[in-house]
Image (spheres, rainbow, N blue to C red):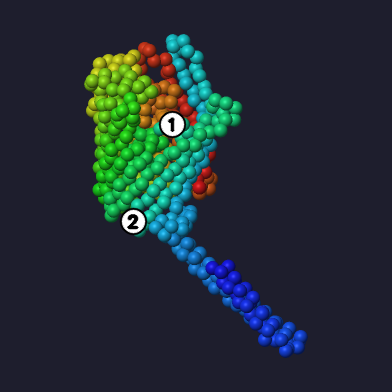
Amino acid sequence: MRKVLSAAAALGLCLALPAAALAGAGMSDEQILKELEDLRNKVASQQEHIDALGAMVDKKVSAKVEEEVKKSGGSKVALANKFIDQLTLKGDLRARYEIRDRDYKDNSGSTDVSRDRWRTRFRLGGVWDNKEENWQVGAGLATGSDDPTSTNDTWSEDKPFETGDIRLDYAYAKHKWNDFSFTLGQHENPYKSSWVFWDGDVRLAGLTGHYGAKEGVFATVGGYSAKLVNDDNTATLVAGQAGYNGKVGEASYTLAAGYHTYSKSLINEGLSAFSLNAVDEDKYELNIGDLYGKVSFPAGPVKLSLYGQLWQNFGADGAVGQSQAGSSFTQKPEDADMGWVLGGDATYGAFKLGYAYSVVEADSLFGYLSDSDFGDGLSKTNKKGHRVQAGYAITKNWSADVTWLSFERDEDYAAAKEDQVDIYQFDVSYKF
């Protein structure tokens, strides 16, 4: 706008100068110079007025942007499209040094093995909000491979100083209507759960419907494409959960009951990568129900959270050796179909502590999608053990954390060589 007004002023000057020259044909040099000086002063005055108008426009635009930023919070990028109000960007970088000690039984004939490695996790995503039409589109990128339970990239894993991969982490559209929302695409797990039941990196791909406000009754249902089987059939996951978010004084709590089931085609495919190659495809199913609870409350200056989850695979069936734990496992699937976890977290200022103990029986859940660290180097199911965490927030967006996981088999058997596994993780994380 300022450039247009300046150009108009310059054009006016070009027209005025010839006119002044013609009109002053009979004037003295002194009079002509005086006329030119007066004209120059008028042009300068007009330019000052134009600059002042431009500054007022810039100030009003900046004030409007600031107002929108304060309403929504966080770091925002204003978009030109009048239908899109804002783009919210978020991301994080985590550097991790990890040690895994795997101890073998004395009579196994194997030597204890220790592995250490450095890993990076980088994630960057954005959400485009359309408030006028009550929908949003989100998309994000993350390091890692096609493993659905990990976004870590191991340094120089196969080649010296190799570069890592960046993949699509999620991409979805979400529509909102009062207390209802519908999400289509690949998105974060919408179900209330503990850390061990689902791995935190799992992104469900399909359609999710949700009802509920910040407090009160909520319900979530969804249908998802779990895997394309034999290139001609899509194995599905159907899930549902209902619960209640409430408050009592300064304490807040969540109670939920859920159920999810996978179609038989996933089991019939019998892939060893999913630990489903030993199960009886005519009898075995993955029909998992769970109960979840969490309560958070202050205890003086300390903020405490206690949680627990109990689950059972009602579809576990078959003979001895027809288990996710493998053909050497010595129990029937229906005798190893339950799991549970109990844990707590405490925050005091910049410090935080956490502890949990979990038992995951051999056929209690779909082990391929459960927490990938708990059981690493041992088994995806048939495991039990501890998780201890400690952390310190150095600044608002920079933190350091230490995690120790120690686990063993829930039910031991003669063919199993490993005795116990301990994992130590040292993290430095940045959020932006």
Residue at 38% x, 55% y is 130
Could you tell me which quadrant the N terminus lies in?
A: bottom right
- Number of numbered discs: 2
- Report if residue 382 is visible in the image: no
| Residue identified by numbered label 1 | 146
Residue 117 position within the rendered picture, expressed as x and y whole percent measured from the top left: 54, 28
Q: Is residue 218 left or right of residue 55?
A: left
Tell me which label, 1 or 2, sits earlier in the chain.
Answer: 2
Residue 397 position within the rendered picture, expressed as x and y whole percent measured from the top left: 51, 47
Residue 94 position within the rendered picture, expressed as x and y whole percent measured from the top left: 51, 39
Mark 1, Cα crowd under 10 Å, few <14 / some 14-19 / many 20+, is few
Res 305 → quadrant? top left
The local secondary structure at tag 2 comes to: loop
Residue nearest the viewer, comparing 136 with 219: 136
| Residue identified by numbered label 2 | 133
Q: Residue furthest right?
A: 29
Q: Relative to 150, say whether 77 is above or below.
A: below
Q: Is residue 87 left or right of residue 33?
A: left
The local secondary structure at tag 1 comes to: loop
Residues under numbered marks 1 and 2 in contact, where contact means CB atoms less than 8 Å apart? no
Residue nearest the viewer, comparing 173 with 150: 173
Q: Relative to 327, say whether 74 is above or below.
A: below
Res 158 → quadrant? top right
Residue 67 position within the rendered picture, expressed as x and y whole percent measured from the top left: 45, 63
- Report if residue 83 is visible in the image: yes
Question: At label 1, which amino acid type do we have?
Answer: Asp
Mark 2, Cα crowd under 10 Å, few <14 / some 14-19 / many 20+, is few
Residue at 28% x, 45% y is 209
The mark found on residue 275 in the picture is none
**Disc 1 to disc 2, C-alpha distance:** 34 Å
Residue nearest the viewer, comparing 296 with 170: 170
Q: Relative to 372, say whether 52 is above or below.
A: below
